[in-house]
Image: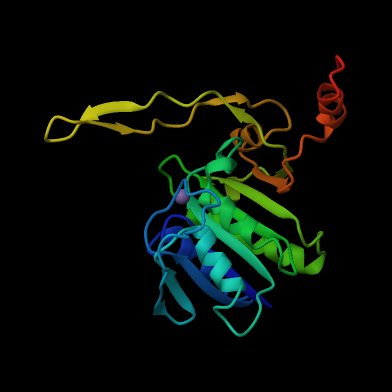
Amino acid sequence: MRILVSNDDGYRAEGLHRLADALRPLAEVTVVAPELNRSGASNSLTLDVPVRVFPFGERMYYVNGTPTDCVHLAISGLFDFEHDMVVSGINDGANLGDDVLYSGTVAAAVEGRFLGLPTMAVSLVSRGGRHFATAARVASELVMRLVRSPLHSSMILNVNVPDVPYEHLRGHRVTRLGHRHKSEPVVRTTDPRGRPVYWVGPAGEGADAGEGTDFAAVAAGCVSVTPLQVDLTRHAALAEVDEWLRGRAP
Ligand code: MN
């Protein structure tokens, strides 16, 4: 088995190395990760400048691009072999609810959806404890489970692991994405020449953090596993919009 490991925190990030180390006993691991921290890069591709690939270890490479660039290159021409799955992470911070729209960690997993096995994004819901070892062990156990009993190959699993010692985890829960409140306002400040500059504010707190959500699972000390799909079609609205287009009241 060949596993491609990527992330969005950049190739120096602790979580990336913890994840690769945890998966090496299970598979031949290739690491292709961004040169810089590209958290929030979502599913962006670099199309305006060429991207370059630099080796930094055995079967380890960094790319001056986004997480999606990394996985796209790795599965479409960079290597003369194919990978079976992508595991992305371990992100330094949660990817819950609306976060998945912005997350480069999730994007890297999504980009691997055409491979033979489901892909997985792993995030540590960090509050300063930084138990990357817990998330690494959870990731390797889930990969072993996938190999023993495969899920549908286009499945994308978004995994959030509470930042506690492994023994303190309260089990696993399958979850749906919750929703966050609107994010905090942008922070306006000035540069040394007096010109305004802005910082994007932090994400809002969980708004729909109720039963069954990823927010509720991690709050209860459980590993949250959310199956994702790429199809953003609002299937339930097809009939309503059809009526609307025909000029009839829905
Ligand atoms: Mn990140």
Residue placed furthest toward the front: 247
Q: Is residue 149 visible to us here?
A: yes
Identify whether 192 is placed above or below 136. above
Q: Quadrant of the C terminus?
A: top right
Left or right side of 105 for 116 = right
Instruction: Give the side of residue 180 with respect to residue 154, left or right.
Output: left
> Quarter of the image containing the N terminus?
bottom right
At x 52%, y 26%, the residue is 205
Q: Of all residues shown, which one is farthest toward the left? A: 193
Depicted 158 relative to depicted 72: above or below? above
Q: Is residue 19 visible?
A: no
Instruction: Estimate the x, y position of residue 155 in percent, counting from the top left.
Output: 75, 55
**Residue at point 39% right, 54% down?**
37
Residue located farthest toward the top when viewing the structure as drawn: 249
Residue at point 47%, 55% (across, down): 8
Residue 164 rendering spot, x and y as whole percentages: 52, 45
Q: Report which quarter residue 185 is drawn in.
A: top left
Using the image as rendered, state which of residue 148 and residue 183 is in the foreground.
Answer: 183
Asked where in the image residue 151 lies, by quadrant, the reply is: bottom right
Return the x and y of residue 245 as percentages of the image width and height: 81, 25
